[in-house]
Image (cartoon, rainbow, N blue to C red):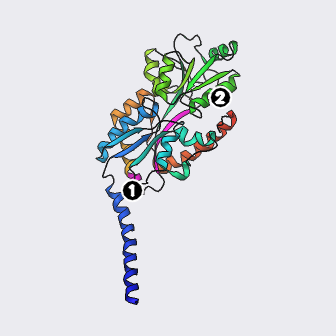
Amino acid sequence: MLARHGVRRQALLAAAMAVVLVAPAFAQNYPTRPVRVIVPYPPGGGTDILARPIMANVSERIGQQVLVDNRGGATGMLGTDLVAKAAPDGYTVLLSASPELVLNQHVFKKMAYDVLRDLRPVTQVATTPTIIVSIPSFPGRTVKEVIALGRRHPGSLTYGTTGVGSPHHLVGELLRLRGKVDLIHVPYKGGGPQVADTLGGHVIISIFTLPVVTAHVQSGRLRGIAVCTSKRSPAVPDVPTMEESGFPGIDISQWFAVSVPRGTPDEVVKTLYTAVSEALRAPAIRKRQLEQGYEPIGSPPEVYAQYLKREIDKYGKLIKDTGILMN
């Protein structure tokens, strides 16, 4: 009997040791199959434009196919929740924007995921200004002229964004409050549909992540009214800042980051961080990003984790000030 218990105990110990040894071995061998990168917005938006060249470069570095999978909806929350609930093995990765990471938790009373509890930071990829644009035929050429027109014709001034709780929505609400003007919000499911309607004149002004419309502003198909950062963007140097336009304090950038499910092994996180940060330093990618209006970053996981917490606190206060809240 004692011998039987001894054999059983040895078997249990062996099984436990196998688990301990297999986990590091799995992480060290990662990746052994294609990696899926969830972009929680439709094709053609700022996150998608950023993700594709980076992930093509990452694929070369890790020696496996990297598949960009667009899962748009609910201001980025559908795709983000998919990753939050995925297996923590490094084969389902999130490349997302700031709304679903820092804004939505302050805007929506109920969310299916908790950013700090369910996701593990890998790296902050890039940041970019938000920009207010219109079609060239619109008579409001400056922020003050836009507000004057809105006051003269109450209820007629619409503004498009990528959704409720997005940085673009926040800019619009700050403009509405500080300009004391009636602005009607028109939310879209992503940058692609918003661009089409803006070019078609279906919304009066639109607020975008800059790279989505950089080419249109440079070509003159859209007029840049103001960038919502403290300094002008080299990609569109003739577009003034909000401060230059008479509205200091409206400094709303959009940033992008890579995350994985909480519980993903350290070695997997290190592999992903190294590949993404090296891709961001590749001359061709860096040049393209700067031309489009992105500022590449590639911060280490621990640095990005601290930044994430600061941004959650910062936008919590801004959301409270504007009163944006969904059921």
Q: Residue at x 37, y 88 (%)?
A: 3
Q: From the image, tell me which residue sits under label 2.
A: 174
Start and end of the magenta stretch? 252-270
Q: Residues within 10 Å of mark 1 (few under 14, many from 20)?
A: some
Q: Do the residues bearing badges 1 and 2 touch, measured as CB atoms within 8 Å?
A: no
Asked if residue 45 can be seen in this view, the reply is yes
In the foreground, 191 or 12? 12
Position of residue 267 relative to residue 19, above or below, is above
Quadrant of res 248: top right
Q: Residue at x 33, y 54 (%)?
A: 30
Q: From the image, tell me which residue sits under label 1.
A: 267
Indicate left or right for 45 with 249 as reference: left
Position of residue 307 relative to residue 155, above or below, is below
Question: Residue 268: within the magenta?
Answer: yes
Q: Secondary structure at mark 2?
A: helix
Question: Residue 144: within the magenta?
Answer: no
What residue type is disc 2 on?
Leu
Across and down, in percent, residue 305 comes to: 52, 49
Q: Residue at x 37, y 80 (%)?
A: 10
Among the two numbered marks 1 and 2 on one chain, the one whose residue lies closer to the N terminus: 2
